Amino acid sequence: MFEIGSYVVCPGHGVGQILNQEVKDLGDVQRVFYIVKVISNGMTVMVPADKKDGLRELITDSEVMTVYNLLNDHEVKVDNSTWNRRHRDYLAKVKTGSLIEIADVLRSLFLLKNMKKLSFGERKMMEQCKELIIKEIAISTGEEENLIDKKIDSCFQE
Protein backbone atom coordinates (compact mmCIF):
# COMPACT_ATOMS: atom_id res chain seq x y z
CA MET A 1 0.00 0.00 0.00
CA PHE A 2 1.18 3.50 -0.83
CA GLU A 3 0.80 6.57 1.36
CA ILE A 4 -1.16 9.65 0.30
CA GLY A 5 1.38 12.19 -0.96
CA SER A 6 3.83 9.50 -2.17
CA TYR A 7 5.35 9.72 -5.62
CA VAL A 8 4.75 6.63 -7.74
CA VAL A 9 5.08 5.58 -11.36
CA CYS A 10 1.92 4.90 -13.29
CA PRO A 11 2.88 2.78 -16.34
CA GLY A 12 2.13 4.57 -19.58
CA HIS A 13 1.75 7.94 -17.83
CA GLY A 14 4.94 8.46 -15.84
CA VAL A 15 5.51 9.84 -12.37
CA GLY A 16 2.51 10.91 -10.34
CA GLN A 17 1.61 11.81 -6.79
CA ILE A 18 -1.06 9.97 -4.84
CA LEU A 19 -3.72 12.51 -3.92
CA ASN A 20 -6.24 10.24 -2.26
CA GLN A 21 -7.54 6.74 -1.80
CA GLU A 22 -11.19 5.93 -2.53
CA VAL A 23 -13.42 2.90 -2.12
CA LYS A 24 -15.81 2.34 -5.04
CA ASP A 25 -18.72 -0.06 -5.31
CA LEU A 26 -18.45 -2.08 -8.50
CA GLY A 27 -21.61 -4.12 -8.55
CA ASP A 28 -21.45 -6.31 -5.45
CA VAL A 29 -17.69 -5.80 -4.95
CA GLN A 30 -15.91 -2.94 -3.24
CA ARG A 31 -12.51 -1.97 -4.63
CA VAL A 32 -9.91 0.48 -3.37
CA PHE A 33 -8.49 2.96 -5.89
CA TYR A 34 -5.59 5.38 -5.71
CA ILE A 35 -6.25 8.81 -7.14
CA VAL A 36 -2.99 9.82 -8.82
CA LYS A 37 -2.11 13.17 -10.37
CA VAL A 38 0.37 12.72 -13.22
CA ILE A 39 3.19 15.26 -12.89
CA SER A 40 3.95 15.79 -16.58
CA ASN A 41 0.46 16.78 -17.74
CA GLY A 42 -1.65 17.29 -14.59
CA MET A 43 -4.04 14.50 -15.56
CA THR A 44 -5.73 12.62 -12.71
CA VAL A 45 -6.12 8.84 -12.99
CA MET A 46 -7.74 6.20 -10.80
CA VAL A 47 -5.66 3.06 -10.35
CA PRO A 48 -6.93 -0.05 -8.56
CA ALA A 49 -4.84 -0.61 -5.41
CA ASP A 50 -4.89 -4.38 -5.91
CA LYS A 51 -3.65 -4.32 -9.50
CA LYS A 52 -0.17 -5.93 -9.66
CA ASP A 53 1.08 -3.83 -12.56
CA GLY A 54 -0.84 -0.69 -11.60
CA LEU A 55 1.69 1.43 -9.72
CA ARG A 56 5.29 1.03 -8.69
CA GLU A 57 7.74 2.89 -6.47
CA LEU A 58 10.30 5.30 -7.93
CA ILE A 59 13.64 3.83 -8.95
CA THR A 60 16.55 3.61 -6.55
CA ASP A 61 19.99 5.20 -6.98
CA SER A 62 21.46 1.89 -8.14
CA GLU A 63 18.73 1.58 -10.77
CA VAL A 64 19.53 5.13 -11.94
CA MET A 65 23.11 3.98 -12.54
CA THR A 66 21.77 0.95 -14.44
CA VAL A 67 19.78 3.29 -16.71
CA TYR A 68 22.87 5.42 -17.47
CA ASN A 69 24.98 2.30 -18.06
CA LEU A 70 22.37 0.95 -20.46
CA LEU A 71 22.26 4.27 -22.35
CA ASN A 72 26.07 4.29 -22.62
CA ASP A 73 26.20 0.73 -23.99
CA HIS A 74 25.99 1.09 -27.77
CA GLU A 75 27.16 -2.45 -28.54
CA VAL A 76 23.65 -3.64 -29.41
CA LYS A 77 22.00 -4.68 -32.64
CA VAL A 78 19.64 -2.00 -33.93
CA ASP A 79 16.23 -3.28 -35.02
CA ASN A 80 15.86 -2.71 -38.77
CA SER A 81 12.37 -4.20 -39.08
CA THR A 82 9.50 -2.15 -40.44
CA TRP A 83 8.48 0.96 -38.54
CA ASN A 84 5.11 -0.58 -37.56
CA ARG A 85 6.74 -3.60 -35.95
CA ARG A 86 9.35 -1.49 -34.15
CA HIS A 87 6.66 0.92 -32.93
CA ARG A 88 4.54 -1.94 -31.58
CA ASP A 89 7.54 -3.41 -29.76
CA TYR A 90 8.60 -0.03 -28.37
CA LEU A 91 5.07 0.77 -27.21
CA ALA A 92 4.83 -2.55 -25.37
CA LYS A 93 8.08 -1.78 -23.54
CA VAL A 94 6.97 1.74 -22.61
CA LYS A 95 3.64 0.45 -21.27
CA THR A 96 5.45 -1.84 -18.82
CA GLY A 97 6.44 1.28 -16.88
CA SER A 98 9.93 -0.15 -16.31
CA LEU A 99 12.50 2.61 -16.63
CA ILE A 100 15.03 0.05 -17.86
CA GLU A 101 12.69 -0.95 -20.71
CA ILE A 102 12.01 2.72 -21.52
CA ALA A 103 15.76 3.43 -21.54
CA ASP A 104 16.22 0.50 -23.92
CA VAL A 105 13.69 2.05 -26.31
CA LEU A 106 15.39 5.45 -26.05
CA ARG A 107 18.80 3.91 -26.76
CA SER A 108 17.42 2.00 -29.78
CA LEU A 109 15.86 5.15 -31.21
CA PHE A 110 18.99 7.25 -30.64
CA LEU A 111 21.13 4.61 -32.37
CA LEU A 112 18.62 4.25 -35.20
CA LYS A 113 18.65 8.04 -35.62
CA ASN A 114 22.40 7.83 -36.38
CA MET A 115 21.65 5.36 -39.19
CA LYS A 116 18.66 7.02 -40.83
CA LYS A 117 16.09 9.77 -40.43
CA LEU A 118 13.43 8.90 -37.86
CA SER A 119 9.76 9.11 -38.75
CA PHE A 120 7.52 11.57 -36.93
CA GLY A 121 6.15 8.78 -34.71
CA GLU A 122 9.64 7.58 -33.82
CA ARG A 123 10.78 11.11 -32.94
CA LYS A 124 7.68 11.55 -30.79
CA MET A 125 8.30 8.22 -29.02
CA MET A 126 11.94 9.19 -28.45
CA GLU A 127 10.87 12.47 -26.83
CA GLN A 128 8.28 10.66 -24.69
CA CYS A 129 10.83 8.10 -23.46
CA LYS A 130 13.37 10.78 -22.69
CA GLU A 131 10.79 12.80 -20.77
CA LEU A 132 9.66 9.77 -18.74
CA ILE A 133 13.27 9.02 -17.80
CA ILE A 134 14.09 12.64 -16.94
CA LYS A 135 11.01 13.10 -14.73
CA GLU A 136 11.50 9.92 -12.74
CA ILE A 137 15.23 10.41 -12.17
CA ALA A 138 14.66 14.07 -11.21
CA ILE A 139 12.00 13.25 -8.64
CA SER A 140 13.79 10.20 -7.23
CA THR A 141 17.22 11.85 -6.93
CA GLY A 142 16.31 15.53 -6.52
CA GLU A 143 18.56 16.41 -9.45
CA GLU A 144 17.51 19.17 -11.87
CA GLU A 145 15.80 18.04 -15.06
CA ASN A 146 18.06 20.05 -17.39
CA LEU A 147 21.16 18.35 -15.91
CA ILE A 148 19.63 14.91 -16.42
CA ASP A 149 18.73 15.89 -19.99
CA LYS A 150 22.38 16.82 -20.64
CA LYS A 151 23.60 13.57 -19.05
CA ILE A 152 21.32 11.57 -21.34
CA ASP A 153 22.47 13.52 -24.42
CA SER A 154 26.11 12.97 -23.41
CA CYS A 155 25.50 9.22 -23.51
CA PHE A 156 25.06 9.53 -27.29
CA GLN A 157 27.77 12.06 -28.15
CA GLU A 158 30.27 10.79 -30.68
Image: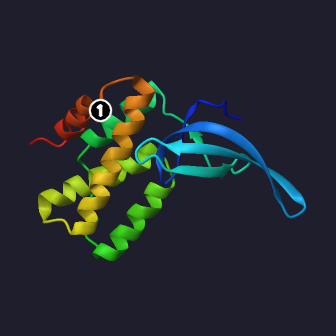
Quarter holding the N terminus is top right
Mark 1 element type: helix
Is 16 placed above or below 139 here? below
Looking at the image, which is closer to me, 109 or 121? Answer: 121
* Numbered-mark total: 1
Residue at point 58% right, 30% down? 6
Looking at the image, which is closer to me, 71 or 137? Answer: 137
Residue at point 20% right, 60% down? 112
Looking at the image, which is closer to me, 85 or 124? Answer: 124
Q: Position of residue 22 (x, y in %)?
A: 74, 44
Residue at point 38% right, 45% down? 132
Q: Which residue is mark 1?
A: 145
Q: Position of residue 40 (x, y in %)?
A: 40, 44
For this view, does 153 lie left or right of residue 18? left
Residue at point 32% right, 35% down? 68
Q: Residue furthest right?
A: 28
Q: Local crowd at mark 1 within 10 Å, few (<14), some, or many (≥20)?
A: some
Is 148 placed above or below 14 here? above
Q: Residue furthest left?
A: 158
Can I make out residue 152 in this image?
Answer: yes
Looking at the image, which is closer to me, 65 or 78? Answer: 65
Q: Position of residue 65 (x, y in %)?
A: 37, 30
Can I make out residue 76 in this image?
Answer: no
Quarter holding the C terminus is top left
For this view, does 65 lie left or right of residue 54? left
| Mark 1 residue type | Glu
Q: Which of the 4 quarters of the picture holds residue 91?
A: bottom left
For this view, does 116 lie left or right of residue 61? left
For this view, does 33 lie left or right of residue 58? right
Q: Residue furthest top?
A: 142
